[in-house]
Image (tube, grey):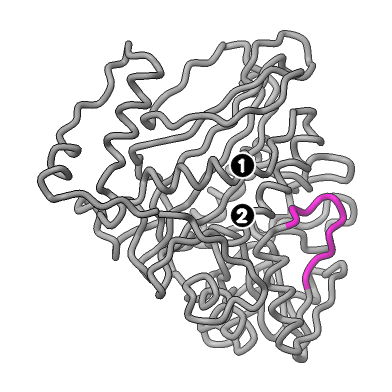
Amino acid sequence: MALRLSSDCQKVTKRLPRPSKSGGMLESLIYMARNAVGRVNEMSEDIDWDSLTFSLTPTDTMYLTETSADDPWMPGSLRPYGPIPMSPAAGVINYGQGLFEGMKAFRTSKGRVVFFRPEENARRMQRGADRLKMPPVPESVFIDAVEQCVQANLKWLPPTGKGAMYVRPLLMGSGPILGVAPAPSYTFLVYVTPVGPYFKGGVNAIDLLISEEHHRAAPGGSGGVKAIGNYAPGMMPSKKAKAAGYAEVIYLDAETHSYVEEVGAANFFCVKDGVLYTPELTGTILPGITRNSVIELARHHGIKVVETKVEATFAMGADEAFCCGTAAVISPIGSITKGDVKATYGDGTPGPVTQKLYTQLVGIQNEEQEDIFGWLHEVPV
């Protein structure tokens, strides 16, 4: 239920001081409850929404809850955004026992605030928790946490069509452990930030470089879950590719070095003779929620979809190509370079299939297209 206050009362809430660093949880909760009042329809005046990029803008509030390895998760609480205390022997710091999710909240054309398929993020985190031997966060706790965090930071949610609020849930082994073993206790937290497009070109086509030296994941590893350790090894090849003028790298499989797996942290698609191809999930590729949505959208619109091993040579001979993910949404690919060979797609604008899928997906997220799949989850405000 939306809150309504007089303008005088709203002015009072804005003047409330932040809790002191030495203040307890009760002080933090009182601060959060009072400071949230009257901000339902307020937007930050400090942000140029048209200049948003995919970068961190610290917001007001985050959510946190903790549990031991043997106890069930209980609902957590909101607190001011900022550092959290952690042992230097924490499992996540020493052994990478951690997962994260990426999701977005949108202001739609109908004036609602919505998530896009948040239940799928909750379930993917549960699968990842099982792989990394952490207690899975119940879906109900996960959904409540992301809802509360968005509600408390509404003024940071961009206007319709100007961007989105990126929501970052984190699950980590925060308890101290010396031997290589699961941590004794865990932290689940959520923070948010307003974001613009992931790639600087927006929906303009991007140029990619196939990495012939590095691989993202190997069979039997953790490539199929959103483990934090999957991402640091990609920073060096990505930085080198960007320095050479490319937007990102394409990783091939670690066994034969011939099949496309992922584009940096996004899933890959290509179109050949009207058929949509994407690498099949073999355990080394993250099962993207946007990937799954693109497949469902394409099939609904009569486009044949083939999930298979996609050879790099086949991809470079395709008619169109694009990558997708929560951050990237759908980004058309203008060219792929492998060694001395460069394959170019179209004239730098999205191909017809790419454009159709982008329009449909963004249209559903903004409620400009009918949500026939029931993907949108309204955030009560």
Residue ID for mark 1: 142
Q: Which quarter of the rendering shows the C terminus?
A: bottom left
* Magenta highlight: main SS: loop
Place residue 31 in its image quadrant.
top left
Query: Residue at the location (15% across, 50% down)?
Result: 6
What amino acid does circle 1 point to? Answer: Phe
Q: Is residue 318 magenta?
A: no
Place residue 172 in its image quadrant.
top right
> x, y percentage for residue 318?
73, 82
Query: Residue at the location (51% across, 60% down)?
Result: 378
Tell me how many marks there are: 2
Segment tinted magenta in the rendering:
278-287
Q: Earlier in the sequence, mark 1 or mark 2?
A: 2
193 up-or-down from 339: above or below: above
Residue ID for mark 2: 118
> x, y percentage for residue 273?
77, 91
Q: Is residue 285 magenta?
A: yes
Image position of 370 (left or right of 229): left
Task: Give yes or no for contact between labels 1 and 2 (Cβ–Cβ under 8 Å).
Answer: yes
Q: For the residue labelled by badge 2, is the local secondary structure a helix, a strand or a loop?
A: helix
What amino acid does circle 2 point to? Answer: Pro
Query: Residue at the location (60% across, 89% down)?
Result: 352
> x, y percentage for residue 138?
70, 38
114 up-or-down from 187: above or below: below
Place residue 184 in its image quadrant.
top right
Q: For the residue labelled by badge 1, is the local secondary structure a helix, a strand or a loop?
A: helix
Residue in front for this viewpoint, 44 or 217: 44
- Seen from this angle, which residue lies furthest left? 8
> x, y percentage for residue 190?
51, 38
